[in-house]
Image: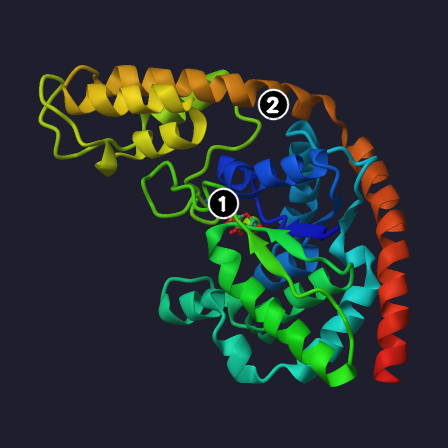
Amino acid sequence: MDTILTGMRPTGALHVGHYVGVIRNMVALQKSGAECYFFLADWHAYNALIDNVDVITKSRYEYVKGWIAAGLDPKISPIYRQSDIPEVLMLNQIFQCLTPPGWADRSPSWKDFINNPNASRLLDNVGFFAYPILQAADIAIVKGKRVPVGADQVAHIELAREIVRKFNRQYKANLPEPEALLTTFPKLPGTDGGTKMSSSIGNVISLNETEKSLQKKVNKMKTDDQRGGVEQPGNPDNCTVYDFHKAFSPSNEVSLINESCRAAGLSCGECKMKLGGNMKDILMPIAERFNQISDSDVNDILSDGARKAKVRTHATWEEIKSLTKF
Ligand code: ATP
Ligand code: MG
């Protein structure tokens, strides 16, 4: 059976974009009985936050609590820190030597950084440039095959596949060629209507929002700016609230909202109350569980997870050493 591997950078709040884009798949895959590895990509976070590592430490707790509150069971699959697994960095070194710089240069994250004059200057480092190579090592060291990710990571997983393929050819090896696995919402927009919810932009609804703060954020979301008033028809295709309904409301209700909005039968205020209600139903039980998990629970989960993950990573590294004769 295919092995599943996915990681997230502890770089701020765990938010509902992560939830609908990746975590829903992580939970479903674990429930399906697949062998899964879940890790905190703290070396990847370091590329972006070298001047602010406190954020990484703080987010570590938030991410693990959020994953477990959302339904992951750390007894079934290891949850670990990337930085607890030295074999990842050793394999990364081999992969770096197999990867022409032009391949890394194709990384969309690097291109975004180069083309965005407002991007943080902290990203101007070779670690960030080469991070898709480290991702390839993250996946290959556990022999991962399917990788739940959001839409922005698909190109990176393709690059990882090329690197693994090259390694397999060079050393007559048989590492699985990784594939991206998307949910039906691989890119949730931000509350500001921006194309992607992201903690670095600050347009997020976090996974442990209170009822009050959740509804407040929903109320501030942009609706169809062409709609003249409640008595005029609106266009759901031009509305952030409708995008969120698609991700959080039952499908029969989504169709009804679409029709009523177009027929001027539903005000934006009512529509936001409906969305807030549906999001509360999903998120409040998660927030409640989140708040019951202590930092010391997280420390125990991570040390246990590292111990379990190392069984696999150590075995893969031994194979790689013998194949590469290094
Ligand atoms: P943030 O900027 O909020 O920290 P990120 O893109 O840095 O988000 P990562 O930790 O790098 O998040 O990625 C974790 C996973 O979550 C990736 O697979 C990414 O594609 C996915 N993801 C992040 N934001 C969204 C979103 N708004 N919608 C869907 N998936 C997302
Ligand atoms: Mg992040």
The residue identified by callout 2 is: 287
* Front-lying residue, 49 or 326: 326
Q: Residue 318 vs residue 200: left or right? A: right
Instruction: Give the amino acid at mark 1.
Output: Ser
SS type, badge 1: loop
Query: Can the viewer see residue 210?
Result: no
Specify the amino acid type for callout 2.
Answer: Ala
> Whole-percent x and y of residue 189?
38, 42
* Image color mode: rainbow
Q: Nearer the viewer, residue 65 or 98?
A: 98
Question: Residue 1 at what x, y percent from top left?
Answer: 75, 50
Q: Is residue 125 above or below residue 86?
A: below
User: Callout 2: 10 Å neighbours few (<14), some, many (20+)?
Assistant: many
In the drawing, does residue 279 fall left or right of residue 237? Answer: right
Residue carrying label 1 = 199
Indicate yes or no: mark 1 CB to ligand 1 under 8 Å: yes
The quadrant holding residue 58 is top right
Q: Residues within 10 Å of mark 1 (few under 14, many from 20)?
A: some
Quadrant where the C terminus lies?
bottom right
Q: Say if residue 66 shows up in the picture.
A: yes
Question: N-terminal of the two: label 1 or label 2?
Answer: 1
Q: Which residue is depicted at the point 43% across and 32% down? A: 247
- Mark 1, mark 2: which one is toward the viewer? 2
Q: Residue at x 26, y 17 (%)?
A: 269
Image quadrant where residue 86 sits: bottom right
